[in-house]
Amino acid sequence: MNTHDPHASSLETKAGTMPPVVAAGGEDVARTFDEFFRSFESYRQVNDARLAEMEERGSADVLTLEKLDRLDEALDATQRRLDDLTLKSRRPARGGQAERGQTSQAIEHKAAFESYVRTGREQALRPLEVKALSASSDPDGGYLVPEETEAGILRRLSEVSPIRAIAGVRQVSAATYKKPFSISGPQTGWVGETAARPETSTPTLAELSFPAMELYAMPAATASLLDDAAIDMDAWIAEEVETAFAEQEGAAFVNGDGVNKPTGFLSVPRVAETAWAWGSLGTISTGEAGGFATLAPGDKLLDLIYSLKSGYRQNARFVMNRRTQGALRKLKDGDGNYLWQPPASAGAAATLLNFPVTEAEDMPDIAIDAPAIAFGDFRRGYLIVDRMGVRILRDPYSAKPYVLFYTTKRVGGGVQDFDAIKLLTFSS
């Protein structure tokens, strides 16, 4: 039962050969968004044909499966292009508008910093940082970038780092952020208007600690780039470190072991939801090792959703990688409706059972006992701690004729509310 679809043929041809992004205009975003919807419609038609073939013959035709795989690749490629275009459209334009509203000291710092980056002259930069009582202003440790540049780096990271975009974020000036929490809570109860008030017991407090670890990137520049006055060095540095920081952060926030890096939420002890206790994340099992159950596979997703308390569900979302999301695209409910739905507008997230989906490539693939799907209110569940200050050390010697810029920031992270995140494990 192979049906030919004209959209499917054209989209299959494009799979893997999507043209590079050259502009971020609204017209490009709208065109790519329309293409994404056409791709999903073709995907649904072919998947419906696959399901019909399995019903009739017990297995799907090989050609249908190949076509579905090609459409899946086309859908992913279009989604990536749409994400890139949307991200580019959100970036502020370069130019003199950035200096508006800045103090004279900030403008002076920016000019001195640019001189240091371009030429290595630090005479103007050193006294400014000493005056600001900066603890990171020595030549061995590098110099603090201007506040505007630091804000630009953090803004870019929040747009391209999937977990940072949905987690709670706090800036601190100390090396470690400590957060107290109540284990038992205060004693409470009901009393009559004239009855004696019994003395309440003191709540039992414990402490969560979030140390900020050093993260670095080392972009390189040519002499011609540094001599080019038209290049905005602040924007160049932010763009160069954006991807490196985002990739390292993304991996640590998911799987980090806490040794010289943040503690990822998948590194927290896991227990079955029925035995959940503070300090661990509750899990729901699919009932099938390495996959979903054959009958009513979406029921376990509903169990995962309702394992979360209602106060957390209001801002909850799914987190998974692209391959897991591809598997979920094929699932339907009992009425034949797809559980996964494409984004309603450019820049919006796809939804699964009406909850938004965040793609995090560091999440594990579907495999035996793998916690491949997380669900929860990550704003309340996971905390990212940024220590104020991004430093740069200019190194013109190690990789001649290139100039290296050793860029460091300190960041920590960990689960702050163990009841706000639940995991779906693919186990029997």
Image (spheres, grey):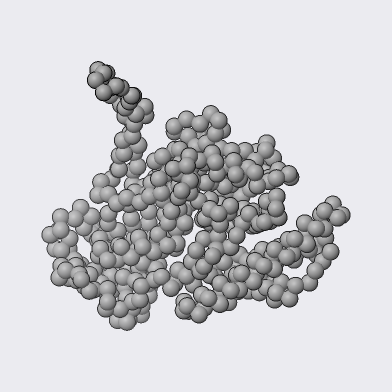
Q: Residue furthest front?
A: 193
Count the labels in the image.
0
Q: Residue furthest right?
A: 57
- The residue sitting at 37% across, 29% down in the picture is 183
- The residue sitting at 54% across, 39% down in the picture is 307
The N terminus is located in which quarter?
bottom right
Q: Nearer the viewer, residue 69 or 55?
A: 55
- The residue sitting at 16% across, 68% down in the picture is 103
In percent of width and height, residue 70 lies at 70, 66
The C terminus is located in which quarter?
top right
Q: Nearer the viewer, residue 274 or 199?
A: 199
Location of residue 201 with respect to 62 vertically, above or below: above
- The residue sitting at 70% across, 63% down in the picture is 44
Location of residue 48 with respect to 197 vertically, above or below: below
Location of residue 315 with respect to 209 vertically, above or below: below
Q: Nearer the viewer, residue 387 or 315?
A: 315
Residue 265 seen in this snapshot: no
User: Along the horizontal axis of the image, is 282 left or right of 234?
Assistant: right
In percent of width and height, residue 302 lies at 60, 44
